[in-house]
Image (cartoon, helix red, strand yellow):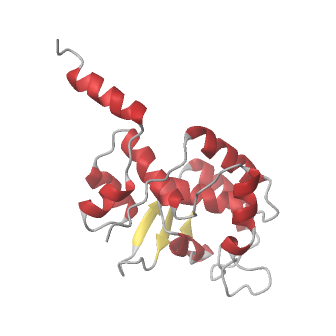
Amino acid sequence: EDNERVRFLADDERTRLLIACRESRWPRLYLLVLLALTTGARKGELMGLRWGDIDLSRSIAYVRRTKNGEPKVLPLLPAVTDELEKFSDKCQPGALLFASPRNPDKPYAVDASSWPTTLKAAKIRNFRFHDLRHSCASYLAQAGASLLEIGEVLGHRQPSVTKRYAHLTVQNKAKLVGRVLGDIR
């Protein structure tokens, strides 16, 4: 099946999106998007996180079960732990990080509310929440990470799957070709 989609955030789009997330009516949208961009985790994995899954002292989050049925550990960058600390004093270990305000046992319905409004405010088109996962993988590829490393971050079993997520920009391709082949005359 040919369902490959090449869509990740350009630098200016990422900046606009993060600004719009900070201004969202839902106070945890910035945290959710930051987690998605910096861990490459799936939306379902993030929405299922509970405060007991977060270890701020070690800067990690435990995903109990991924799409492929295995647990994984997400490294948390300082910006993410700083943001988590803003909310941590109000939550019990069993509580969802991204709970619905109406039903704390269910995740917040981000796609039905905050996400579309935020994309519109950021002037970003043709972008799904899942594309944040592609963005993470693409940023890693652009920084020189190998497919094996990117696959490990995303939790892929097959390099062919990782290849679908990791994209280089034209500028990155030009740098690579210049670095490797620049002396050919």
Q: Where is residue 61 in the image (x, y as percent from the top left)?
A: 51, 66
Number of marks in picture: 0
Q: Is residue 108 left or right of residue 182?
A: right
Q: Position of residue 174 (x, y in %)?
A: 34, 28
Which of the 4 quarters of the picture holds residue 94?
bottom right
Q: Which of 156 and 125 is in front in this view?
A: 125
Q: Is residue 94 visible?
A: yes
Q: At x 73% / y 58%, what residue is drawn?
A: 118
Q: Is residue 76 visible?
A: no
Q: Where is residue 93 in the image (x, y as percent from the top left)?
A: 63, 78
Q: At x 59% / y 57%, what residue is drawn?
A: 126
Q: Where is residue 168 in the image (x, y as percent from the top left)?
A: 38, 42
Which residue occupies the extreme front position in the image? 2
In the rendered view, tell whether residue 127 sits above or below residue 100.
above
Q: From the image, which quarter does the C terminus lie in?
A: top left
Q: In this view, does 140 lie to the left or right of 22?
A: left
Q: At x 66% / y 59%, what residue is drawn?
A: 31
Which of the 4 quarters of the picture holds residue 184?
top left
Which residue occupies the extreme right position in the image? 25
Q: Is residue 38 left or right of residue 123?
A: left
Which residue occupies the extreme top position in the image? 185
Q: In this view, does 84 lie to the left or right of 5?
A: right
Q: Nearer the viewer, residue 159 or 174?
A: 174
Q: From the image, which quarter does the N terminus lie in?
A: bottom left
Q: At x 27% / y 68%, what residue is drawn?
A: 157
